[in-house]
Image (cartoon, rainbow, N blue to C red):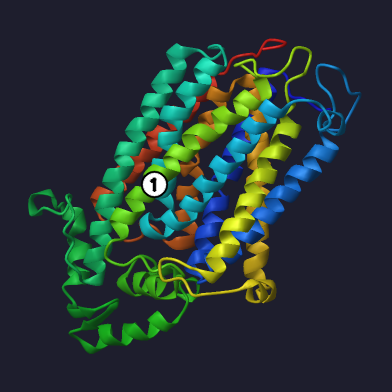
Amino acid sequence: MYVVTDKGGGIACIIIALVFLGTWPALFNLLERRGRIPSHTFLDYALTNFLVAVVIALTLGEIGRSTPQTPNFTVQVHQDNGPAVGFAIAGGVLLFLGNLGTQYALAFTGLSITEVVASSLTVVGGTTLNYFLDDRINKATILFPGVGCFLIAAILGLFLHASNMDDVRAKLGTKTGSWLSKENLLSNGEADVKAEAEEVEMVKGHQPVYKDEEAQNNLERRSLPPAQMNYADRGNSEFLAAVEERRAIKTGKSGALIGGLLLIAVGGCYILFSPAVNLATNDQWHFLKPGVPNLVIYTAFFYFSAAFFFCSLVFNITLLYFPILGIPKSNLTAYAMDWGWNRIIAFCAGIICGLGNTLQFMGGQAAGYAAADAVQALPLVSTFWGIVLFGEYFKSSRRSYIFLAAMLIMFVVAVGLLIGSAGQRKDGQ
């Protein structure tokens, strides 16, 4: 069995996992904005995610000679390790709930803010739990300042979200009503946003009626998918209206409240799933019988992914027939016929997430799960994709750009501190 044991290898796994885990939500968001039914996407994603776990267990989990302390995958699945398997399954269920909530939260709060809030809650809660579970092998004087930086980044992300929502509403010609939209908070950098809003005479849904003929002709572009618009159109009112018209999940007026509640629930699930895997692979609470080895990372990940896949099947097949949030009804026949690039993208999302989770756990086993929570700086990656793929923050106000830059800087500092806190797990620890 191949095992990463040194701190340097663990850190390398964590950095690669950061890139992978920051990419799959962007693919989810892309498919939702293209109008694909979310349950179709999640079923495809869960299938390839599970296949990754099976392939890794039968390859990396079978390399080399099996030993009593580190048995190969096929040996360990027959051992009496029920409590550890239970923790791995619990971790998979928690990750499923978190990923499902993320999928819907993306529609309400956008890619960047969803990942910012969810990852920051994960670090503040999950990293603290992992630090004590791992017998404090990470350097607390470096680790917890990093946790503090994550918390600051989350607060900056909330301000960024409020500022960006003001910009979006101004572009669409609607009243902002945000706690950041007071007149005395308006900066000169928002002049362009307000100028565009002044062209709108009235709004019906997402269809503004412009005062002049030239602006009215711009409405024709709203029939185009956002991806087919000119690059210069990103961030303007036509682009934003086209996105809302095409997307699968209709957020409605209560979108901010629903999105906020979803983010809190997602954060709670993400806080607990990594400590559950930690307990599955290290048995800190001594539930295993004497002489029974701890679950190796590949066996734990197999059970973890199997639980994730089973929950995904049950819940998302139910959502095909009983959809929520204005999503069209579907069925298994329609799902089976839904082939094309959308399915390939969803398959890729599952593969990327499966590899990212594996690398996170491999890195955590070598350098400490608290340090592995550096992967929660994935907003560094997801914000990049949000800008490149979806035009997030295009033509926003100066205030939004300041919040965006400050948030990203804090994430860079935070990930550096968490990785810098990495320890060396002792044999048998």
The quarter in which the N terminus is drawn is top right
Q: What is the quadrant of residue 176 in the picture?
A: bottom left
Is residue 191 rendered to the left or right of residue 61? Answer: left
Q: Please, is residue 346 above or below residue 82 in the view?
A: below
Most distant residue in the left direction? 184
Q: Is residue 351 above or below residue 133?
A: below
**29 lies above or below 302:** below
Q: Is 175 drawn above or below residue 334 in the view shown?
A: above
Residue 280 shows in the view:
yes
The percent coordinates of residue 129 (x first, y second) are 48, 22
Residue 111 placed where, x, y %?
44, 53
The one nearer the camera, 67 or 32, is 67
Location of mark 1 (residue) = 263
Q: Residues within 10 Å of mark 1 (few under 14, many from 20)?
A: many
Residue 421 visible, this angle = no
The amino acid type, in three-letter code, at marker 1 is Leu
> In x, y percent, where is residue 235?
35, 65
Q: In percent of the image, x 84 and y 24: which residue is there?
A: 71
The percent position of residue 289, horizontal first and vertical second, equals 73, 16
Q: Residue at x 85, y 38 (%)?
A: 59
Compare residues 205 and 289 and report the one nearer the observer.
289
Determine whether, in the image, residue 377 is placed left or right of residue 316: left
Q: Secondary structure at mark 1?
A: helix
- Left/right placement of residue 305 relative to residue 416 reads right
Q: Quadrant of the C terminus?
A: top right
